[in-house]
Image (tube, rainbow, N blue to C red):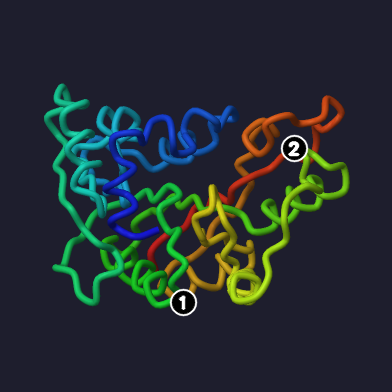
Amino acid sequence: MEKKYWEKIAPNYETEIFDVLHNDKSGKIVKAIHQFANKKKSVIDIGCAVGKWIPVLAPIFKTVRAIDISAKNLAIAEKKYMKYDNISYECVDMSAAKLKPQKYDSAICINAILTESLKKRDLFFKHMSSFIKKGGDLVLVVPSLESKLFSHIIANKWNVDDAKKDIAPTGKKAISQIRFIKDGVTDIDDIPTKHFLKEELELLLTLAGFKVEKIEKIKYKWSTEFHKPPSWLKNPQPWDWMVKAKKK
């Protein structure tokens, strides 16, 4: 998912992109943020998109820095949340080779590390770490590779949404998909998207200078995966990974 993709999707973001805040019926992410919220401290929303988390952050932090790769996303967010006077916006590419130094007391990053490029993901983790003060808190949410593979198994075994009618790729496309899946990259709406293993997340964050405090599932309804999920399909549910970590 590159800058041009997000600029193109921005006008239809609300209907095209999965809403983590709305679908986290457990409220675990909001609860995790409130645990370190402080009206005397700053927070940065990394990959804020159209600002869905701004109404959560603005009332409980002194200042909120909202950054995103898409200028159009930021324009939408700024217009939508004009009532908050403690928000600042900046267009930032987290996969850039260099970024100007910034330090915040805490950070959230909700399903923003999605690029298929390993190099760009490494830079993203590096910069994310550099933005947080020593002892600062991070709430990170990413797509789960385990969940994605589980959904594929369910779909194929019980032919959910006519999965057996899907045409298997051949030639270069098949080779490309095999290469991608070995790196945890699988399609969402035909867009190659990085998904993470639990242990992979723990290692990446540790190497980036964080102490991982907790990794847990953010569970969603099966209707978020399938158009027509079987009535008997209840648990386990599909999920994203949420990580609570502290900058060492």
**At 21% from the left edge and 33% from the top edge, which residue is drawn?**
76
The secondary element bearing badge 1 is classed as helix
Q: Earlier in the sequence, mark 2 or mark 1?
A: 2
**At 37% from the left edge and 48% from the top edge, which residue is drawn?**
108
In the rendered image, residue 177, in percent from the top left (x then y), is placed at 62, 69
Q: Which residue is mark 1?
A: 207
Quadrant where the N terminus lies?
A: bottom left
Q: Which residue is mark 2?
A: 161
In the rendered image, residue 192, in percent from the top left (x then y), is placed at 51, 60
Q: Is residue 208 left or right of residue 23?
A: left
- Cβ–Cβ under 8 Å for marks 2 and 1: no
Judge the density around disc 1: few (<14), some (14-19), many (≥20) Cα neighbours within 10 Å: few
Q: Is residue 218 above or below residue 202?
A: above
Q: Any mark on residue 81, and which? A: none
Quadrant where the C terminus lies?
A: bottom left
Q: Is residue 169 left or right of residue 206?
A: right
Task: Decide which of 43, 157 is in the foreground and name it.
Answer: 157
Task: Decide which of 117, 215 is in the foreground and name it.
Answer: 117
In the image, which is nearer the foreground, mark 2 or mark 1? 2
Picture quarter containing residue 102? bottom left
Mark 1: amino acid = Leu
**At 29% from the left edge and 36% from the top edge, which residue is drawn?**
51
Kindly report the distance in space between the C-alpha atoms of the residues bearing marks 2 and 1: 40 Å
Judge the density around disc 2: few (<14), some (14-19), many (≥20) Cα neighbours within 10 Å: some
**At 26% from the left edge and 54% from the top edge, which residue is drawn?**
69
The secondary element bearing badge 2 is classed as helix
In the rendered image, residue 215, in percent from the top left (x then y), is placed at 59, 54
